[in-house]
Image (cartoon, rainbow, N blue to C red):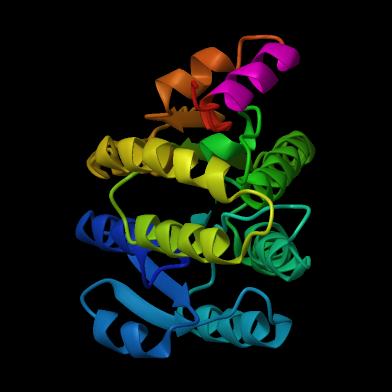
Amino acid sequence: MKYMLVTGAASGIGKSITETMAKRGWKVFAADQNKEVLRSMEAKNIIPIYMDVTKEKTIIDAFIKVAKETLYLDVIINSAGIRYITSLIEEDLNKLQKAIDVNLIGMIRVNNLFFSLLNKETGRIINISSESGWISPSPFNGVDSISKHAVDAYNDTLRRELNFLGVKVIKIEPGTFKTPMRQNTIDSFKELIDNTKYYKNELKNMSRLMKNEFKSSENIKYLLYSIVQACESKKPKIRYRVKNNISLVLMNLLPEYIIDKIYYNKLKPKKAIK
């Protein structure tokens, strides 16, 4: 039997990973802060574990429960994450602090504590980042870009350190998939439009771009295929970029000042012709 821990397991990507890997015969410790959903997830090969990655005591309690069930873990998958659409100059830092605490610091807390359980011969750490972690940031996506760029830097540093110990560290950089995260992003965007003092018109233009992006959201099966490869392949890649937005990828090849002009021209309201 192979054992894995999945954070953020009660919704979105984490829930899909949990269910997929359990069907493939893995014993999955499904960790999340949503107790109500966790209670409904208990099934063959799935052991729900309460954990809030921003609260160290809950991580310690989860560690104790996992350690009672197994002497080792084969894989740790850090899937817990949040995303906000904000205006950096108007944000009071609460959302940025929350995103960094969940997306980055929570990941570090989990890896540092559960590393002692990781099988040092075959163990793997898989960190879920985003295309926002490597693509040049877009306006109003700064909170996500800041936290995910930090996740990428953490992942790469950890990989190079754990190379000396023989432990593989793999990052997953997904594009936009059909998960509940889309609705969270839409709600965050609506909140920004309602509250902004400076960007009403620009955000109205951006809303059309977002609608097009969500219409082209990919089926999560492509992401799950990469997760399976990262977990089970004898020679996994160090990075899986899965269905990243091709327009953003191509734009990322341009000089920064050109990217600035593209965003300005796309979002700046056109002056009426008299």
**In this picture, is 191 found above or below 87?**
below
Horizontal placement of 243 versus 158: left or right?
Answer: left
**In this picture, is 195 found above or below 17?**
below
In this view, the residue in front, 115 or 100, is 100
In this view, the residue in front, 22 or 210, is 210
Horizontal placement of 252 versus 241: left or right?
Answer: right
Magenta residues, as a range? 256-265
Residue 164 is one of the magenta-drawn residues: no
**Residue 216: where, in percent of width, then height?**
27, 35
**In this picture, is 10 found above or below 82?**
below
In this view, the residue in front, 146 or 44, is 146
The quarter of the rendered structure image containing the N terminus is: bottom left
**Residue 141: where, in percent of width, then height?**
60, 45
**Residue 178: where, in percent of width, then height?**
28, 49
Residue at 27% from the left image edge and 38% from the top image edge: 218
Residue 126 visible (yes or no): no
